[in-house]
Image (cartoon, rainbow, N blue to C red):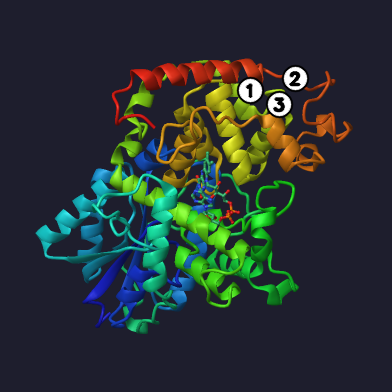
Amino acid sequence: MTSARGRTLVWLRNDLRLRDNPALFHAAEPRCGVVAVYVLCEQFIKQHITGAARLDFIRRHLELLNRDLGKRHIPLVLLRVAKPDSIPSKLLKLAQKEGCEQLFFNAEYPVDELARDRAVAEACRREGIRFKRFHDRVILPPGKVRNGQGEPYQVFTAFKRRWLELASSQLAQPHGLPARQPEETGEVKDRGHRPDTLFTDLALRDLSSLWPAGEDVALKRLKTFTDGAIHDYNAILDYKKTRDFPAQSGTSLLSPYLAVGSLSPRQCLNAALAANGENWQGDEGVETWISELVWRDFYQHVTVDFPQVCRHKPLQPHTDRFPWRSSDEDLDCWQQGDTGIPIIDAAMRQLKDTGWMHNRLRMVVAMFLTKNLRIDWRKGEAWFMSQLIDGDFAANNGGWQWSASTGTDAAPYFRIFNPVTQSERFDPKGEFIRRYVPELAGLSEKEIHQPPPTKGYPEPMVDLKASRKKTIELFKSLNSEAPSGERS
Ligand SMILES: Cc1cc2nc3c(=O)[nH]c(=O)nc-3n(C[C@H](O)[C@H](O)[C@H](O)COP(=O)(O)OP(=O)(O)OC[C@H]3O[C@@H](n4cnc5c(N)ncnc54)[C@H](O)[C@@H]3O)c2cc1C
């Protein structure tokens, strides 16, 4: 252990990969030794509702990282704490024990994580340990995309225009693998937990057959989606045409990997540009997919610029006075996929069965919960987090506030999706419904969207037309009471 002093401690969080990981890459560059650490925080798991599928996905990623980092002589230490307050002292103790003179990590943006990182930074300053934070979770860091007055954007199209100007003029290339470290720096006195003991007593849900872990899988899926050389078919080129049809695999299915960080958004953008001959414009499938990556950045920026969204507050303050209904029974029907509206039930069962839901259906079920059942969007947001394998605070909160008409660039309150019309339009043959609601499998294409009384399947739990009307009235009176400037 002669040269184990002067090592760098890299704190891994939602960036569970080796390639294009700025903190890891820069820590490894001088080849003076790197120790990696992951800290599981029980309070955050509870408070942020990290679901069992996502926790198991993290566990599986840590197993692979342990192996792959080890090959580069980078030991991985796994720590578990009850509360975030103890993280600074745990990290400092580890750094001191293992001769690490600096701490590197990639930024996370929700307020609890920022507060945790500030406390760590403060402790490092006190103890004379240098620390460095990198921006990794986004393509353009928060604060970078501003309007002429230097203010954050609240409307996506304007954000996107500026984002494209900036990104196309200064696109950062993804980093490669971190350098292999000298063998003699590759040991630690105590590795803490093993990947299998780190999660003891926590509910885990193994969805490995649908969502195998690891950056190799993630990169392969990205390549399959963007590189026609593999199957002679480039799914990304058809993305605009196929993305709204849940029965087809028209989207990339990369969200779990982006959420856990086994894939970086820069790797995605680079692959998309390569599919388009390194052009930003041209193919409309590629352009539309890049737009989704911009949405992803947008919501991460919103989290930083409007931190009230992290405190269960709507972005538009006046909407907090909306009279949401409270009904555990109705909420349960929605959660279990027992509403009597086939497309809603199919979507909610897809979520329960696979830990994932198609984007169009996320909007449809969110609107149904908030606009037809008039149940608080925060209840839906929490249920999604508990079930999703791709649960990501910024995207989930952004999607829910958009659907509930309480957020940035939200859907106007009077534009309410009718789930039956959406079903007829985007699942015309009822293939998706049949897959998840076998009770209706025998119905015709015409009947399946709005079935006649069918044995074993409930009647619709709500009158879509009347509930829509009531919600619009309530929003209208809310908006007329709101001080000007607060309204959408
Ligand atoms: C109510 C609601 C809740 C949502 N919750 C989440 C969540 O917890 N985690 C999550 O990753 N996405 C969430 N989304 C966004 C979107 O539904 C998923 O990212 C998408 O369905 C993932 O599938 P895909 O990887 O095949 O996406 P693709 O269509 O292939 O898109 C590529 C990537 O772009 C990003 N992206 C796409 N659409 C959006 C969007 N609207 N907002 C932000 N990023 C986007 C994702 O990272 C996605 O993997 C939510 C949307 C809504 C309406």
For the point 51% across and 70% down, the residue is: 280
Q: Image point 21% across, 76% down: which residue?
A: 6
Question: What amino acid is labelled 1 in the image?
Answer: Cys
Q: Determine the secondary structure under disc 3.
A: loop
The residue labelled by disc 1 is 333
With 256 as the anchor, is 42 left or right in this view?
A: left
* Of callouts 2 and 1, the N-terminal one: 1
State whether residue 72 is above or below residue 421: below
Q: Nearer the viewer, residue 55 or 264?
A: 264
Q: CA distance from mark 2 to mark 3?
A: 9 Å
Q: Nearer the viewer, residue 488 or 427?
A: 488
The answer to whether the beta carbon of the residue marked 1 is less than 8 Å from any atom of ligand 1 is no
Say whether disc 2 or disc 3 marks the residue closer to the N-terminus: 3
Q: Are marks 1 and 3 in contact (CB under 8 Å)?
A: no
34 left or right, relative to 130:
right
* Residue closest to the eye, 97 or 42: 42
Placement of the C terminus among the 4 image quadrants: top left
Amino acid found under the numbered disc labelled 3: Ile
Q: Are marks 2 and 1 in contact (CB under 8 Å)?
A: yes
Query: Which circle, 2 or 3, is nearer the viewer?
Result: 3
Residue at the spot of label 2:
458
Any part of residue 277 in sight: yes
Q: Which comes before the other along the chain, label 1 or label 3? A: 1
Residue 67 horizontal/vertical position (percent) = 49, 70
* Front label number (1 vs 3): 3
Amino acid, disc 2: Pro
Please name the residue that numbered disc 3 is placed on. 341
User: Which residue is at a point 82% across and 41% down the rendered structure image?
Assistant: 429
Q: Secondary structure at mark 1?
A: helix
